[in-house]
């Protein structure tokens, strides 16, 4: 199974996936990593010798134009699966229509609780005792697609957004690698 991974940030989930995929027995391999900005995490891909591309959101006149270029970049690689690993933009319809349901996303909350760009902050603000991590299939909505895997993570007294996010990320990584593995072996079938 070939993967294209899209990121915006530090790429710690990407790195975990690159490490897992570098084992000869892992049934999927990362063929390209893309970003919507000059993301720090692209360095992980370079370290693993994986080609990267950047389609800077702010360089395009409209979301549609950005989306068309992102779709063109992805099409050049023809990935079996697109993994959104901290991409902080809504995927353009041009990409969703072309690849769905073969697009998955990792989210730092227990969906459908706390969707959107601030899942960790929103859980903290709500004062819940537990939040979590989820892996979902992308559909037309915001973090609304079918849930493939999820796990609870406790919120502890004194947590900040950063400490809580640091507790969630290792769970996200484990769930993501496991989901990719199960998709690649056919244990998990994606549908909208
Ligand atoms: C992850 O928690 C992801 O779910 C999100 O942003 C974080 C990305 O972290 N929305 P990293 O870039 O993989 O370190």
Image (cartoon, helix red, strand yellow):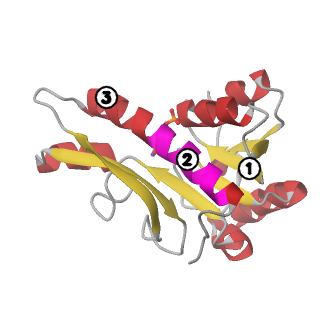
Nearer-the-camera pick, 94 or 180: 180
- Locate residue 162, reporting x and y percent: 31, 28
- Locate residue 164, reporting x and y percent: 27, 33
For marks 3 and 2 on the same chain, the one whose residue lies earlier in the sequence:
3
For marks 1 and 2 on the same chain, the one whose residue lies earlier in the sequence:
1
Q: Quadrant of residue 49?
A: top right
Q: Horizontal placement of 52 versus 114: left or right?
A: right
**Distance from the alpha carbon under mark 3 to that under mark 2:** 25 Å
Q: As displayed, is residue 45 above or below residue 148? A: above
Helix, strand or loop status at disc 1: strand
Q: As displayed, is residue 25 above or below residue 76? A: above
Q: Given this view, does label 3 or label 2 mark the residue nearer the observer? A: 2
Q: Horizontal placement of 142 versus 177: left or right?
A: left
Residue underneath mark 3? 162
**Distance from the alpha carbon under mark 1 to that under mark 3:** 27 Å
**Looking at the magenta stretch, what is its main secondary structure?**
helix
Circle number at residue 62: none
Q: Horizontal placement of 52 versus 92: left or right?
A: right
């Amino acid at each position: 199974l070939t993967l294209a991974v899209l990121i915006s940030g530090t790429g710690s989930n990407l790195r975990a996936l690159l490490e897992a995929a570098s084992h000869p027995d892992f049934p999927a391999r990362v063929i390209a990593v893309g970003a919507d900005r000059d993301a720090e995490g692209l360095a992980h891909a370079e370290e693993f010798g994986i080609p990267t591309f950047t389609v800077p959101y702010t360089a395009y006149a409209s979301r549609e134009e950005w989306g068309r270029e992102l779709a063109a970049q992805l099409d050049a690689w023809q990935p079996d699966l697109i993994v959104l690993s901290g991409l902080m933009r809504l995927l353009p319809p041009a990409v969703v229509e072309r690849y769905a349901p073969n697009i998955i996303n990792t989210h730092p909350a227990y969906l459908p609780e706390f969707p959107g760009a601030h899942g960790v902050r929103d859980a903290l603000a709500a004062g819940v005792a537990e939040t979590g991590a989820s892996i979902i299939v992308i559909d037309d909505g915001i973090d609304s697609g079918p849930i493939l895997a999820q796990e609870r993570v406790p919120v502890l007294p004194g947590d900040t957004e950063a400490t809580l996010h640091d507790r969630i990320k290792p769970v996200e990584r484990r769930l993501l690698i496991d989901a990719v593995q199960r998709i690649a072996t056919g244990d998990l079938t994606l549908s909208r």
